[in-house]
Amino acid sequence: MSHHFIEFDNVYFSYPGGHEALRGVSFRITHGEKVALLGLNGSGKSTILLHTNGLLLPTRGTVNVGGIPVTRRTAPEVRRSVGMVFQNPDDQLFMPTVEEDVAFGPLNMGLEIEEVRRRVADALQRVGAEDLKQRAPFQLSGGQKKAVALATVLSMEPDIMVMDEPTAELDLRARRRVADIISRFNHSCLIATHDMDLARELCPRAILVADGYVTADGPTPEIIKLFTSVI
């Protein structure tokens, strides 16, 4: 059995204050699948993504990543396998320079400094941000921040990548670069997006979420047609 999988089994989650954001969510993503997560704002998409690496933990039910049940104890191990690209890159960038941000993950994995340097150079090259490495993240444009946030994940060489609106607010060139990176990622990928063209292009399968429920799961063209018929 491949270890590059994500499985949600009857997952419920309530935020402090009682709002039930997930209601019995179940699905499985296997090795190499690229799956789009579709739904209106507030439907539960981001909450699902935050469960994949233990940033949130189920109120009931289980999340399993690569054979490891996600718990408070196992979350650090799971995060070595799951790379998450947040919708807002400011949630991901916090070091004084771009280079230090991209190096942060590999350094915390205990890698040798030469391997860290190799990964940083490769990740920045892949996102077209080599010339930004000495810049302060807060000085970057929105598109540049998104590119660097993606590089921070790529530098960790994850088995699974989860992405929250990766092409939002990007120009056509930056969007094309992100789409190319996703298409070349050979492992499992879960993408929450409102970009229907991206979903059609990259994801053979889509999961539709509404009010915390999975309401449909199947071929992306069919799920998009269903989704657009009810909005």
Image (cartoon, rainbow, N blue to C red):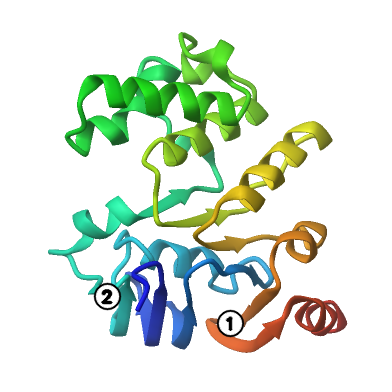
Residue 91 seen in the figure: no
Spatial separation of the CA atoms under disc 2 and disc 1: 28 Å
**Residue 81 screen position, x and y as percent:** 33, 56
**22 left or right, relative to 186:** left
**Residue 13 screen position, x and y as percent:** 37, 78
In this view, the residue in front, 190 or 212, is: 190
Report the amino acid beneath label 2: Gly
Report the amino acid beneath label 1: Asp
- Quarter of the rendering occupied by the C terminus: bottom right
The residue depicted at 53 percent of the width and 81 percent of the height is 212
Q: Which residue is mark 2?
A: 67
**12 up-or-down from 195: above or below:** below
**Residue 213 screen position, x and y as percent:** 55, 86
Q: Which residue is mark 1?
A: 211
SS at mark 2 in the image: loop
SS at mark 1 in the image: loop
